[in-house]
Image: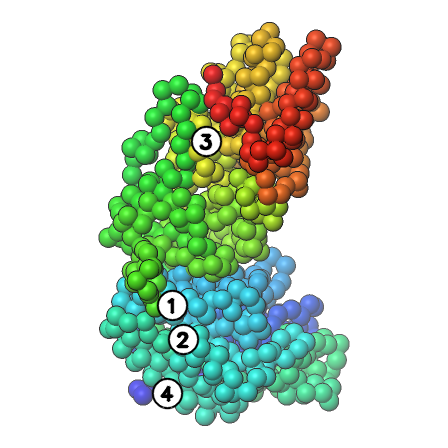
């Protein structure tokens, strides 16, 4: 071992000193004078307990990176240990390079300490502001998924992922252990999980720290890993053991990279005290190696002289005068442990993926378009056409290896299976003769965990690649919280000039609420859109393409976009082809517009029939046909909305319409009957400031459903064509008496429908065979 472990220990002590200083100190960063209450922050925030272990791992990784010239990305599972990553990136110089106002000297140390968990400063957890990070520390459970996503198609990269033992209790993390069964040893990078068992969470012991060694070992080996153990509390022995294990583990990873078989990847179990090297007791009760060390071990420092004395003793135990020179800069010998340039974990371009991002080569959409001779008279399956387009995206970018499709066992179910003409599903586990499309090196990743799909895709995108997540609409809710974290990451990153834009997170939600009639009520939920709409307008986009050609246009746009979360909801079943490809491109560019060919309003309508979504569009056009037949004098304007954000004012969203444009489209005083894909109140929420909002009547999903027919789903939720015609009769002034018979006819049709499906088990013939005339 060429590097003296005393240097590793000094580096570790320096990181621990800087970490504790961030939690406590506003001034006197080098302890050049005795601590006084004025040197202490008025609010003490942060997490100490996990931090010494993170610093320990970081210091040892620096040694092995420098000695072996490794390319390593550090993923911090216990992201609340933010002081550790801030301390280490400052020590290695990347923090000061990123933020020149926090230099590597006494003034910079004071700034580093003062800004931590301070108004106008930086968060207490690992966040986008931290160089070298791709993993938001605001929520536990996703670190391993992010790590494996980062490793895909990065054959020279080792992703060192520290997994907290509290984090290990979460569902997403428990599933993520299986991700090793997808990693191709030759074509992908390696993930080195480091399970950090420090024994406690906020107020309880952690499960994996309290089970017998043989049970823990069996669990990890059952997941497919070979665990190496580093356990203890005496620093000198722990340094020696960690260095020994890291060398063995790196040797094993290099050996694995030369194999074709599914390997048993190495991992490290680090068992160290919680709050290691901190106060052993406070006020007569144990702190180190207990749950009391989780956050701030000494809480009353400003008001308690004994606590203040104990804090100073704790800080001086790291011997800062040996670690920093008189100006406050790290001593030169510490730099001997710092890797060079972008080998520093805080400077790796993999953690600022926009630096590595290459444009996708995109096929033309016209070659996949549905031919439309007359509006609405032919039918096609939108997602099947998208599958052919994605097949070509895979082919065009095969050499670059920078595009993947992720999904929970639903690629074929969502009719994207054309991709399997040119690639397979990546899979390293056992295969049988009956299996299809499984291969060691595929561009599709399927695992029946929405958490794992989302996490791997996020890691893939944040390290500079492109992808698509396809899922059943009702079950995308499983990743609500993960979407939250990613949207917050993007929002923050967009305001950091040094973070370069990354490819957007693209959701394709199919098998949606209006065609889950066969699966029933549990599979019917369009509410993810509502959840997405709560996020900042600069980050989120929602598209509801009504047919095949609009889906192709929207998908082309989304795959080219940067720094967004794009939600695309599209059906997989046959639907009318409403627009030619040229019309579709123009309509999608508008985001919302009048369909002249379906309207007869000339300059001023009597009523506006609006729609957003494929099933609502069919019903609006069918209702329009009924009105043409029975009330030919009624002037009807049909408006289709493909970009949901267009409904907002332009002051609220970049895609929003100015009031004049909205008023021109929807009028200022005419009734608007709006058929919407999801929950009706979202449309009211988006339009409540508009002049004509009081005349807006929205139909959509209202939590009525069962195992039934597609049209019955619409009837149950009052969004069928007959109900829409009744709404027109009821809401157009002066029409009620003139159209009384039409209203009665529509009510009779709804009653006839109920009787028909109970006798025949299928929809009315005129519904099944309906075509736009």
Q: CA distance from mark 4 to mark 1?
A: 27 Å
- Label whose residue precedes the other's in the sequence (4 or 3): 4
Mark 3 neighbour density, 10 Å: few (under 14) some (14–19) many (20 or more): many
Q: Secondary structure at mark 1?
A: helix
- Residue placed at 54% from the left, 55% from the top? 479
- Label whose residue precedes the other's in the sequence (2 or 1): 1
Tell me if 39 is positioned left or right of 430 in this view.
Answer: right
Residue 224 shows which numbered tag? 2
Q: CA distance from mark 4 to mark 2?
A: 22 Å
Q: CA distance from mark 3 to mark 2?
A: 45 Å
- Residue placed at 60% from the left, 7% from the top? 633
Above or below: residue 523 compared with residue 277: above
Q: Secondary structure at mark 2?
A: loop
| Nearer to us: label 3 or label 2 | 3
The answer to the question of whether label 4 and label 2 lie on touching residues, with beta carbons closer than 8 A, is no
Q: Nearer the viewer, residue 494 or 106?
A: 494
Q: Which residue is mark 4?
A: 244
Mark 4 neighbour density, 10 Å: few (under 14) some (14–19) many (20 or more): few
Q: Secondary structure at mark 3?
A: strand
Q: Which residue is mark 3?
A: 575
- Label whose residue precedes the other's in the sequence (1 or 3): 1
Quadrant for the N terminus in the image:
bottom left
The answer to the question of whether label 4 and label 1 lie on touching residues, with beta carbons closer than 8 A, is no
| Nearer to us: label 4 or label 1 | 1
Mark 2 neighbour density, 10 Å: few (under 14) some (14–19) many (20 or more): many
Q: Which residue is mark 1?
A: 181
């Amino acid at each position: 071992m060429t590097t003296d472990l005393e240097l590793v220990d000094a580096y570790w002590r320096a990181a621990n000193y800087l970490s504790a200083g961030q939690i406590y100190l506003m001034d006197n960063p080098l302890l050049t004078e005795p601590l006084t209450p004025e040197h202490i922050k008025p609010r003490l925030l942060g997490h100490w307990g996990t931090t010494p272990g993170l610093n320990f791992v970081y210091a040892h990784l620096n040694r092995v990176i420098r000695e072996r010239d490794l390319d390593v990305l550090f993923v911090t599972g216990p992201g609340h240990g933010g002081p550790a990553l801030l301390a280490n990136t400052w020590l290695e110089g990347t923090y000061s390079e990123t933020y020149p106002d926090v230099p590597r000297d006494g003034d910079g140390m004071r700034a580093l300490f003062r800004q931590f968990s301070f108004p106008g400063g930086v968060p207490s957890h690992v966040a986008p502001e931290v160089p070298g990070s791709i993993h938001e520390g605001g929520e536990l459970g996703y670190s391993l998924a992010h790590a494996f996503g980062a490793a895909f198609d990065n054959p020279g990269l080792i992703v060192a992922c520290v997994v907290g033992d509290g984090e290990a209790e979460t569902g997403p993390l428990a599933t993520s252990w299986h991700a090793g069964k997808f990693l191709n040893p030759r074509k992908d990078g390696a993930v080195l999980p480091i399970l950090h068992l420090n024994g406690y969470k906020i107020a309880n012991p952690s499960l994996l720290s309290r089970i017998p060694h043989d049970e823990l070992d069996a669990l990890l080996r059952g997941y497919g890993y070979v665990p190496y153990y580093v356990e203890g509390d005496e620093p000198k022995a722990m340094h020696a053991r960690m260095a020994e294990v890291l060398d063995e583990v790196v040797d094993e990873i290099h050996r694995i990279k030369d194999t074709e078989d599914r390997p048993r990847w190495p991992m490290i179990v680090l068992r160290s005290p919680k709050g290691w090297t901190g106060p052993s007791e406070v006020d007569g009760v144990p702190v180190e190696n207990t749950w009391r060390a989780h956050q701030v071990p000494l809480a009353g420092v400003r008001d308690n002289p004994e606590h203040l004395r104990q804090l100073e003793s704790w800080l001086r135990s790291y011997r800062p005068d040996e670690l920093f020179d008189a100006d406050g800069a790290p001593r030169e010998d510490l730099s001997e442990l710092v890797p060079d340039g972008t080998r520093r974990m805080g400077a790796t371009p993999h953690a600022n993926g926009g630096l590595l991002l290459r444009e996708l080569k995109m096929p033309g959409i016209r070659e996949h378009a549905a031919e439309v001779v007359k509006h609405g008279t032919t039918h096609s399956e939108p997602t099947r056409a998208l599958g052919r387009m994605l097949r070509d995206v895979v082919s065009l970018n095969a050499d670059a290896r920078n595009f993947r499709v992720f999904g929970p066992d639903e690629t074929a179910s969502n009719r994207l299976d054309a991709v399997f003409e040119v690639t397979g599903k990546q899979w390293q586990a056992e295969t049988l003769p009956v299996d299809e499309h499984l291969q060691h090196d595929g561009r599709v990743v399927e695992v029946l965990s929405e958490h794992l799909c989302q996490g791997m895709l996020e890691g893939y995108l944040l390290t500079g690649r492109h992808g698509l997540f396809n899922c059943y609409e009702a079950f995308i809710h499983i990743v609500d919280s993960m979407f939250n974290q990613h949207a917050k990451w993007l929002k923050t990153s967009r305001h950091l000039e040094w973070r370069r834009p990354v490819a957007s997170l693209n959701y394709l939600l199919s098998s949606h609420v209006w065609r889950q009639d066969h699966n029933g009520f549990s599979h019917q939920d369009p509410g993810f859109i509502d959840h997405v709409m709560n996020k900042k307008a600069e980050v989120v986009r929602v598209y509801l393409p009504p047919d095949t050609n609009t889906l192709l246009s929207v998908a082309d746009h989304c795959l080219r976009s940067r720094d967004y979360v794009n939600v695309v909801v599209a059906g997989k079943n046959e639907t009318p082809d409403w627009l030619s490809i040229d019309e579709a491109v123009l309509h999608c560019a508008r985001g919302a517009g009048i369909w002249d060919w379906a309207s007869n309003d000339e300059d001023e309508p009597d009523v506006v029939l609006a729609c957003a979504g494929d099933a609502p569009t069919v019903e609006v056009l069918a209702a329009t046909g009924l009105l043409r037949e029975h009330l030919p004098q009624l002037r009807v304007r049909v408006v289709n909305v493909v970009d949901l954000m267009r409904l907002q004012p332009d002051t609220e969203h970049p895609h929003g319409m100015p009031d004049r444009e909205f008023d021109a489209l929807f009028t200022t005083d005419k009734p608007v009957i709006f058929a919407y894909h999801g929950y009706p109140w979202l449309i009211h929420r988006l339009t409540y400031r508009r002049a004509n909002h009081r005349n807006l009547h929205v139909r959509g999903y209202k939590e009525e459903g069962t195992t039934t027919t597609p049209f019955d789903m619409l009837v149950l939720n009052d969004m069928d064509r007959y109900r829409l015609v009744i709404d027109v009769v009821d809401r157009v002034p002066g029409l009620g008496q003139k159209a009384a018979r039409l209203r009665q006819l529509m009510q009779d049709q709804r009653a006839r429908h109920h009787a028909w499906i109970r006798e025949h088990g299928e929809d009315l013939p005129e519904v099944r065979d309906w075509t736009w005339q």
